[in-house]
Image (cartoon, coloured by chain):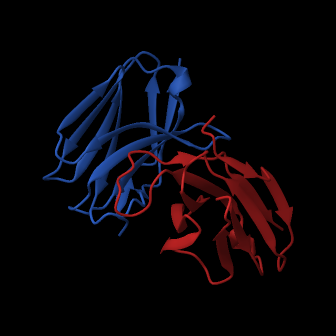
Chain colours: A blue, B red
Amino acid sequence: GEDVEQSLFLSVREGDSSVINCTYTDSSSTYLYWYKQEPGAGLQLLTYIFSNMDMKQDQRLTVLLNKKDKHLSLRIADTQTGDSAIYFCAETPSGGSYIPTFGRGTSLIVHP
Amino acid sequence: DSGVTQTPKHLITATGQRVTLRCSPRSGDLSVYWYQQSLDQGLQFLIQYYNGEERAKGNILERFSAQQFPDLHSELNLSSLELGDSALYFCASSPAGTGDYDTEAFFGQGTRLTVV
């Protein structure tokens, strides 16, 4: 199976909250990331969380990490049409090698 | 703008041909990573270079090769191209290599390769 798994699609109404979920298999993951990819663009880091943290909040973004279940989520409050993009979960293992392993990405569609 | 430049943005070529994709990392970044993004495989790590030397290899085919030059730009060479090689190829850079934790890799906008 894949090392990082995400659901492929999420559709929400503008103004609602979006929650994008991710599971990973590597229990030694050190950093976990959320990247955003807008159409025709590269990946842009949104936020990251260190593995000894449970939660991180950054304006409209809230990251929750359940290390026991190896579950990471990204909550976007007051979702806007400009948030429509593909969101990638990624993790880097311990051991000194920064090579993030990415999930397949979740396409977030925000409709009026 | 991430500071990572990839050229060309689009490339259309025939099966069996060879192409070279180019990446200029952010100023000062020593590490360059190549990723392939396709619909069926998602984002796959291909190879990493650090300060001119190969540092790590991922799912890179033998038909593919890369190098990093003294000025730190990198090239990804794809040969004997097949239809299945059609994908978006991303380059990313970060300041450090193994042993140091970077909290972010900066991605270029990618080169869309279409093999016909």
Give residue B22's quadrant in the image. bottom right
Residue A55 left/right relative to B42: left
Residue B4 left/right relative to B12: left
The residue drawn where x is 35% and y is 53% is B101
User: Residue A82 at x, y = what percent?
Assistant: 55, 23
Give residue A43's quadrant in the image. top right
Q: Is residue B61 visible?
A: yes
Q: Nearer the viewer, residue A86 or B57?
A: B57
Residue A48 left/right relative to B63: left
The residue drawn where x is 47% and y is 49% is A105
User: Residue A35 at x, y = what percent?
Assistant: 46, 42
Residue A43 left/right relative to A78: right
> In the current view of this chain or complex, which residue is farthest to the bottom?
B62
User: Residue A27 at x, y = what percent?
Assistant: 20, 61
The residue drawn where x is 73% and y is 72% is B77
| A69 over B50 or under it: above or below | above
Q: Is residue B57 visible?
A: no
Image quarter where the N terminus of chain B lies is: top right
Image quarter where the C terminus of chain B lies is: bottom right
Q: Report how many numbered discs are placed on residues in the image.
A: 0
User: Residue A70 at x, y = what percent?
Assistant: 21, 53
The residue drawn where x is 45% and y is 55% is B96
> In the current view of this chain or complex, which residue is farthest to the left?
A68
